[in-house]
Image (cartoon, rainbow, N blue to C red):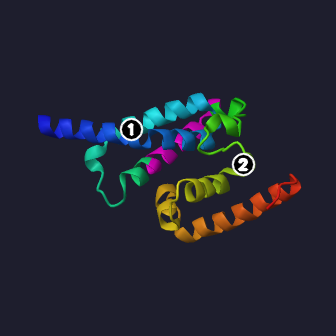
Amino acid sequence: MQENVDGRKQAFTAMVENYGQDLYRFCCVQLRDAHLAQDAVQETFLRAFRYYESFRHECSEKTWLFTICVRVCRNIRRSAWFRLVDRSVQAEDIGSVFVPEENSIFSYVMELDEKYRVCLVLHYYYGYKTQEIGTILRIPAGTVLTRLKRGREKLKNLLTEGGEEL
């Protein structure tokens, strides 16, 4: 019994070290609030620790954590309190990994509707394939492809309106 708990603690510690920053940035994108993002990451890891035995290893740990994270963020966004507070995080607040100083495209990505923004971030910033994004968001791969296509079109329109070079 003690070996099982120690193994779970070691796996959990490795997950926090490996994926903590990625989850934090993703939560910032979804929630548009750095403090809520910290809370969401903490809740994600608490759920992962609690249900680690039920993890079937049908996908990577990272995909599993992002799936939990999407649900946690969705629950936060559904709360009445969340809808009453202004969400105005700047792209620069999310971290230099997303926003190199010479690149302002991410600020335009943040202006997109959530369904397009999340698919684009998972695909282009985290490198997930269409099927994995579908698993994380619990939507069909065809829907992911459509959202990626429409998101790119909307992003292109925003960039041309903003006077950015393509």
Locate residue 68, reporting x and y percent: 44, 46
Residue depicted at 66% across the width and 57% down the height: 116
Q: Is residue 1 visible?
A: no
Residue depicted at 50% across the width and 35% down the height: 40
Secondary structure beneath dot 2 equals loop
Secondary structure beneath dot 1 equals helix
* Callout 1 touching callout 2 (CB < 8 Å): no
Amino acid carrying label 2: it is: Asn
Toward the viewer: 17 or 87? 17
Res. 60 mark:
none
Q: Which residue is mark 1?
A: 17
Mark count: 2
Toward the viewer: 142 or 158? 158
Locate residue 158, reporting x and y percent: 81, 55
Spatial CA distance of label 1 from label 2 is 27 Å
Classify 9 as above or below 154: above
Residue depicted at 37% across the width and 56% down the height: 60
